[in-house]
Image (spheres, rainbow, N blue to C red):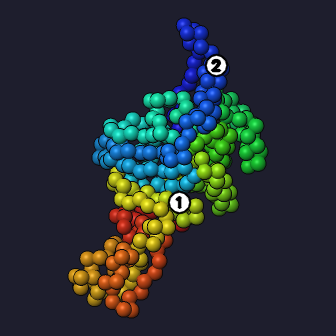
Amino acid sequence: MEMSIKTTSGASGVDLSDMEACAEMRFVMEDSNYYKEETPILEVKNLSKQYKGFLLDKVSFTLPRGYIMGYVGPNGAGKSTTLGLITQTRHAMEGEVLLDGRSYADDPILYKEKIGYVSSVSYFPPMMKVKDAAAILKQFYPTFSKEKFYRFVREWNLPENKKLSTFSTGMMVKLMFAAVLARETRLLILDEATNGLDVLFREEILNLLQRYIEDGEHSVLFATHIIDDLEQIADYIVMVEDGRVLMQDTKEALTENYILVKGDESLLAREEIAKYLLGVRRSAYGFSALIQSDDAAALPAGTVMEKPGISQIMSYLMKGHDKMEMV
């Protein structure tokens, strides 16, 4: 996540420590006075961003408090662009993002203080050591706790006296998780953050995310193409493709709204049946496709029907299904 260095102003006489104290006080005061249970942690409204050859087109979704949302789609769908607009490292052509009901313009310091961002790509300079990272984080984020930070660093056996350039991808991701978990955030944004992690540590991170939201006041937005992680922990799923929201719902609703069907290819010639089939795939043994649960009554007796997982729903509905990693 982009960091903005706060400096002392000689003209105003405002000291850096005063600014940090004020930011921390605002964070605490907002927790006790501003928070309303009905206010979502994150509201994304009609976000649009144009690049050469790509348009993020009026993306909207809402993430309630105390939940994990999977933001999924093939590479190039617009996931990272959306996250950049939420974290204010990119600027939208139009649209609005509200965090706890407030925009970035309302209070930039508090807005960024509330977001913890972890990517598969390090945002720490490679010549730093762990102690340098800790010092910088404390400057940028008033609620950063060195005690919590070093507890994670030592629990995960990260070398404290080596330059970060010597860290593996997995070690750098662990360092970024230590950095965000040592702060008083409200929203964790993960951008392919479990890429390159071994299975055991991935499981540990998923457990940490569950503990992070268990008080009902924190949420996680998890952008990934590793669908197995979301099958385990996501409460909501937003699917994007070609810069647009393809669908969004709770994980349970998505898996209950669709049925995976398999049958003889002769069924495809029957218009009254074929019109309901989604993402048809042919093989030497017939076909497979999705059908909405409400339309399943149109299928003849003997048609094989199965409950699909999130990965199967994505695979059949998205044009870019071959780019997804169905672990």
Q: Of marks 2 and 1, which one's residue comes earlier in the chain?
A: 2
Is residue 120 rendered to the left or right of residue 174?
left
Q: Nearer the viewer, residue 285 or 205?
A: 205
Residue neighbourhood size for the residue with mark 2, other residues' Cα within 10 Å, grouped as few (<14), some (14–19), many (≥20): few
The answer to which quarter of the image holds residue 261 is: bottom left
Report how far apart the C-alphas of labels 2 and 1 lie in the structure. 40 Å
Q: Which residue is mark 2?
A: 18
Residue at the (41%, 45%) spot, across then down: 44
Residue at the (34%, 72%) spot, across then down: 279
Q: Nearer the viewer, residue 128 or 60?
A: 60
Image coords of residue 93 (percent x, y): 32, 37
Q: Compared to 140, does 278 lie above or below?
A: below
Q: Compared to 263, does 223 lie above or below?
A: above
Residue at the (27%, 82%) spot, across then down: 273
The quarter of the picture where the C terminus appears is bottom right
Seen as rendered, the residue at the extreme bottom is 302
Q: Compared to 295, does 191 lie above or below?
A: above
For label 1, the SS is loop
Image coords of residue 157 (percent x, y): 76, 48
The answer to which quarter of the image holds residue 200 is: bottom right
* Residue 280 seen: no
The answer to which quarter of the image holds residue 154 is: top right
Amino acid type for the residue under numbered disc 1: Asp
Image coords of residue 180 (percent x, y): 63, 41
Residue neighbourhood size for the residue with mark 1, other residues' Cα within 10 Å, grouped as few (<14), some (14–19), many (≥20): some
* Residue 248 seen: yes
Q: Which residue is mark 1?
A: 235
Amino acid type for the residue under numbered disc 2: Asp
